[in-house]
Image (cartoon, rainbow, N blue to C red):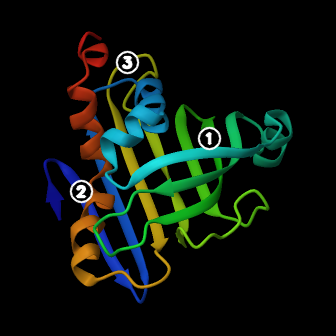
Amino acid sequence: GTKGGCKQFLQKDGNKLNSKGVMELPYLRDDILNFMMCDEGRHATDDLYNKETILESFDKQATEEILGPGTEVLACDIVYVETNRPFPGVTPRDTCVIRCTYLFEGRAVVCMDSVDHPGAAITPKYVRSLVGGGLVITPAKDPGTPGCTVATAQCVEPGGYVPQWAVNTFAPKRCLLPLLVLEAMNDRPQFAER
């Protein structure tokens, strides 16, 4: 379906939640990317997000060689992410992902997938979730001209038990990430002035 101009798709497959969202945003590619990746942007668009810690960073040049010609790697890290408790009685989640952010053919791309890392040991404070997905920000015209298509996709296996009412509350927000980014950026004067 569509909500607020954001095309959305949500599917439950066993214990996995697959979500996609696509929407046009009237901002520059780099502004959208920087906002989506910064702590302020994450808190503004994800009620469950608490904090992230970079555990390990990979050499950008070596990563560019793996990804191929024409790729400019901005960051490639292993990141530990902690979430807030969604409701009383529901254990907060954590995850550890390898996340690569790069530019290719004018697009900004972020890819992530769950990994194990010694710096992200499983603790009783959290239930470990598995996450795979990413986003693509495609400029409508020249990268210096405002207007981009933002497409997000994510597959989450939340791990452990999650009540259906909690899934029904938070899962639809995964699809609406581009709309939530638009609303949050519209509320910030630094973007409205451009």
Q: Foreground residue, 190 or 106?
A: 190
Amino acid carrying label 3: it is Thr
Q: Position of residue 129 (x, y in %)?
A: 53, 71
Element at label 1: strand
Above or below, 191 relative to 61 = above
Residue drawn 39% across the image and 23% down it: 28
Above or below, 169 relative to 173 = below
Q: CA distance from mark 3 to mark 1?
A: 21 Å
Q: Position of residue 171 (x, y in %)?
A: 30, 68
Q: Residues within 10 Å of mark 3 (few under 14, many from 20)?
A: few
Which of labels 1 and 2 is toward the front? 1
- Farthest bottom residue in view: 14
Identify residue for label 2: 7
Quarter of the picture containing the C terminus is top left
Residue drawn 52% across the image and 55% down it: 82
Q: How many marks?
A: 3
Say whether residue 21 is left or right of residue 14: left
